[in-house]
Image (spheres, grey):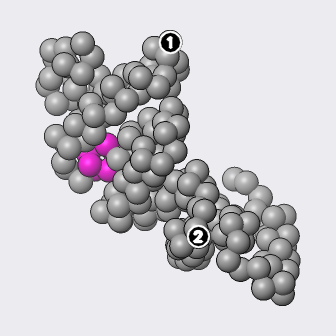
Amino acid sequence: MKEYHAAEPYLVKSKNLYTQFKDTTSLNYYRLLSHFGILYHGKGLYAEAKHYYKMAIEGFETNPKPDWHHLASINFDLAIIYEQTGQLNEALIYFNRSMNIRVDTLKTLKEDYARTAAAIANIYQALGQRDRALRTLEYALPILKENLSENNFIYAEFLKNLASMNLEYGHYTISDSLT
């Protein structure tokens, strides 16, 4: 387990300084809030982590020039907390928000997209929605093919997960998405 106690005093001091200088609407302040989310998530203090992640998300979303990459990552991290605490419907909301930001705004899909698509599929699978899980992976496949070389490890892992899910569901023929 990581030792988060070393980071905490620096984060607290930094937050106090931002507040003192009345700089609580800058992108750097929202990044700082997300670091508190990471800190508390790592310490297993999920309520506190959710609080800071949500504050950071709200700040980024209301900023005229949001940091889209950071916003996508924070939504993903918040979804992980909801998944870890068994709140799968909430997790799905934030995984989808992360995915939408990556697709609509960043146009940089690659590994983050594959990881998010797999997480969404896992949630659907845990909710017993196997068809939606499989459709999520099949939808993501052509996008990944376009953005990753076929000899990429992430692409190989994604194909393995898609194959495993198809085998589990008794689908043994080649998917149209591969042709």
Task: For label 1, count other residues whose C-alpha is less than 10 Å away and answer few (under 14), some (14-19) or many (20+).
Answer: few
| Label 1: element kind | loop
Residue under circle 1? Answer: 151
Left/right placement of residue 45 relative to residue 166 reads: right
Image position, residue 102 (x, y; %): 47, 46
Tell me, yes or no, if residue 50 can be seen here. no
Q: Compared with residue 112, is residue 44 higher up or lower down, i.e. above or below?
A: below
Task: For label 2, count other residues whose C-alpha is less than 10 Å away and answer few (under 14), some (14-19) or many (20+).
Answer: some
Residue located at (45% from left, 52% from top) = 101
Image position, residue 67 (x, y; %): 61, 57
C-alpha distance separating marks 2 and 1: 39 Å
Specify the quadrant that holds the C terminus: top left
Dot placed on the residue nearer the N-terminal end, 2 or 1:
2
Q: Which residues are magenta?
A: 121-126
Residue under circle 2? Answer: 63
Q: Nearer the viewer, mark 2 or mark 1?
A: 2
